[in-house]
Image: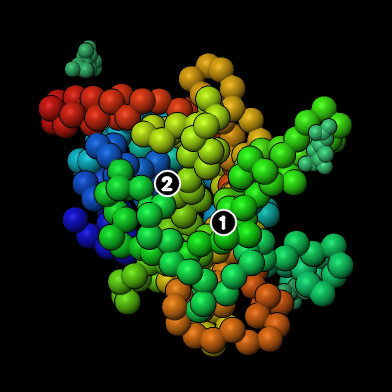
Amino acid sequence: MAPLYQAINVQLQEDVPGSHTVYRAVADPEWTVAAVPNGGYLLANIVDASMQFQASAKSHSDPIHVTAHFLHSTAAAPFHVRVRVQKRGKGFTNLVAELQQNGKTTITSHLIFGILAPPAGSSNKTLAPPSPYARRVPLYRHPSTAPLELEKIRDVYKFRRYFQCTQEPEIRAKATLDSPTRTNKTTVGGGGVEGGTWFGLTDRDERITTPSLALFADAFLNIPLLIPKSQPQALRWGWFPTMVITLEFKFPIPPPSKDHASRTVGMFWRGNFINDPQGRHETYVELWSAPSDIGEGIEVDGWRDNQVCLAVANQMSLSLPMEVNLKQGSNDSAKL
Ligand SMILES: *[C@@H]1O[C@H](CO)[C@@H](O)[C@H](O)[C@H]1NC(C)=O
Ligand SMILES: *[C@@H]1O[C@H](CO)[C@@H](O)[C@H](O)[C@H]1NC(C)=O
Ligand SMILES: *[C@@H]1O[C@H](CO)[C@@H](O)[C@H](O)[C@H]1NC(C)=O
């Protein structure tokens, strides 16, 4: 039962030089979706362990890309992260990290580390404002004045008391049945559903950190929840376990300042397909720096120019009845 900065609690257990390093942590029972720890929260612990591993290797200290496959659900209990080097190159280091509980690997992941900045002496190839090709913050509201989201934080998120979200009425309007973004036989492409919010940690001791981006990348409302109830694909009381997630880090987190919040990120996501088997669906997520924390600061001209995309994620998740979650949670706990 702890805020995020304490709930990500990785510690060195054993270093076997030339082979691997083992870290230990405890999955906090509050960072769960119903009975099962949130996949992004577990991934945050894997990223943290891998960053500690690279810090002690004194090379390539920044995570650049993470792919994780979720093999079994992990219980809210102690676990280990076993990290080893797969390849040390000049520009990048490839790691393999496995989350293990009771001798079973529940998550396996590959990570690429490097330096999140242009190499010294090279020309700067970054595509960013004011280039007319630059991607811009995809949220309509400023966090100081955006309406608070009260109903949409699902009570199955046991950690919901640690954060607050804002509404994006313009984005929500695009999900309605009468939106001009609906499709028919004359439209080209289009379809799918989008979501967006400012996501802020409320505890004043919190800071957004590189590992915590893994949690934010998995904290969106899945598209079966955003589709109107009248549609057969809509699901209101469901569990959406992640099977595979990829997370690519784009820009370093800007230090807190008058232009950048310390505890808030912008989240934008979109999904196009829901398929068999098991309501499988893909979600594309962008995480952005925020100009202020929620309900704080003031909207100044040009705030959009100062924001950067922190990470882009993609994931494949399933749509399962909530009963499956509750059963897995209780079964795993019973075994410990
Ligand atoms: C590279 O250019 C981008 C976009 O203009 C800028 O944000 C970044 O600070 C630059 N990096 C360096 C090292 O100059
Ligand atoms: C198809 O959808 C577009 C966009 O919503 C709308 O403008 C058009 O009238 C629709 N056509 C038909 C035949 O329903
Ligand atoms: C608990 O898990 C075991 C396999 O790990 C399975 O055989 C058993 O049916 C499960 N029990 C319940 C109540 O789901």
Which of the 4 image quarters holds residue 332? top left
Name the image colouring. rainbow
Decide if residue 30 is on the left or right side of residue 217. Answer: left
The C terminus - image quarter = top left
Residue 94 visible in the snapshot: no
Query: Residue at point 51% right, 77% down?
Result: 145
Callout 2: helix, strand or loop? helix
Looking at the image, do the residues carrying marks 1 and 2 touch, with CB atoms under 8 Å apart?
no
Q: Earlier in the sequence, mark 1 or mark 2?
A: 2
Q: Which residue is mark 2?
A: 40
Decide if residue 21 is on the left or right side of residue 254. Answer: left
Decide if residue 104 is on the left or right side of residue 228. Answer: left
Which of the 4 image quarters holds residue 310? bottom right
Q: Which residue is mark 1?
A: 196
Query: Residue at point 63% right, 59% down?
Result: 170
Question: How packed is label 1: few (under 14 Cα within 10 Å), some, or many (20 or more)?
Answer: many
The N terminus - image quarter = bottom left
Query: Residue at point 75% right, 62% down?
Result: 135
Looking at the picture, which amino acid does disc 2 mark? Gly
